[in-house]
Amino acid sequence: MNNTDALRLLEFSRNQQKSPPKGLDYKKLPFAWVARAIAVGRSTQTSLRYWGKYASVEALIRIAQDIPKIENPDKLARAIAVFSERPFPLDYTLLLELCRHENEKVVWQAALALSWFSDPRIRVLAFEFLANPDTAREGLYLLELNFQEQDWEFLGQLTFEISDDRCEELTVRICEIAKTNPSVQAQKTLLQLYEAGSCASCRGYIIEKLQDLNCFPDWVLEEMLLDSYDYNREKAQAWAASQLEQK
């Protein structure tokens, strides 16, 4: 899959997963609304993200041009949040620099905004983040469009004997990497997440990716037929029935 196709899949995937908060028509909110929201912090970063999703290119450029002038970390994080749902319209070298900011909120928002781009520098930064458990989430976002086939070996090591609390944190992002960069080599990593985690929703997400990649082991299917989560059992029953029809 080339970078253009991967970017299209990433955009489609993110749009499918997220629903905007109710109560506001983000398509109609004027620039004055977002300027005040960034300045005084009376709106959530989620609201700012959805305003950015529907904003004009001209409005996004105005905010991007102001970012280097912002000194307050909270205000800076809010301004960058506008670019979670749309690619940053100016030179994203600025985002690379902000990913090394001392404020963790700024780093998180800068990583989200930077994750729309493919660049060797971003790949290097992704592995720097992945080397630290506190920034692994940011690293996985940056790796998604900067992924190489051999990286499944690294992710297999990352998830080996992973704790339950970290498993849930990383599962969704790794499944999204598998969706954007499909390969049967993802099986080892996905199975390690499956065995380590206790979240029923995460198990369901993992087995869907294994099924999509056509590397769904029989022993997992047998376990899922007895899963405590209704949705997982129903999916497993449907797959089992499909296998019988094919025989």
Image (tube, rainbow, N blue to C red):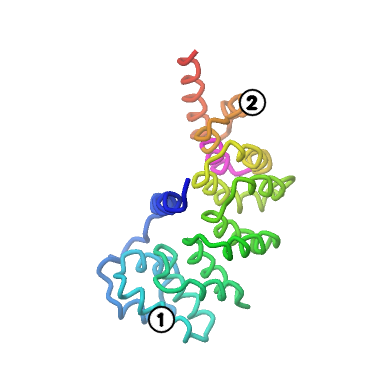
* Residue 48 in the image, given as x and y percentages of width and height: 40, 70
The kind of residue tagged 1 is: Gln
| Magenta region, main secondary structure | helix
In front here: 153 or 176? 153
Above or below, comparing residue 100 to residue 114 in the picture = below
The kind of residue tagged 2 is: Trp
Circle 1 residues within 10 Å: few <14, some 14–19, many ≥20: few
- Please give the range of residues in magenta: 198-208
In this rendering, would 8 be left or right of 237? left
The mark lying in front, picked from 2 and 1, is 1
* Residue 45 in the image, given as x and y percentages of width and height: 45, 69
Residue at left offset 32%, top offset 75%: 59
- Assign a secondary structure to mark 1: helix
- Assign a secondary structure to mark 2: helix
In this rendering, would 75 be left or right of 34? right
In front here: 77 or 126? 126
Residue at left offset 52%, top offset 72%: 95
Residue of label 1: 65
Which sits earlier in the primary sequence, circle 2 or circle 1? 1
Q: Is residue 15 magenta?
A: no
Residue at left offset 48%, top offset 29%: 234
* Residue 15 in the image, given as x and y percentages of width and height: 39, 53
Above or below, comparing residue 211 to residue 200 in the picture = above
Residue of label 2: 219
Residue at left offset 67%, top offset 64%: 128
Tell me which corner region of the image, top left, top right, bottom left or bottom right, holds residue 98: bottom right
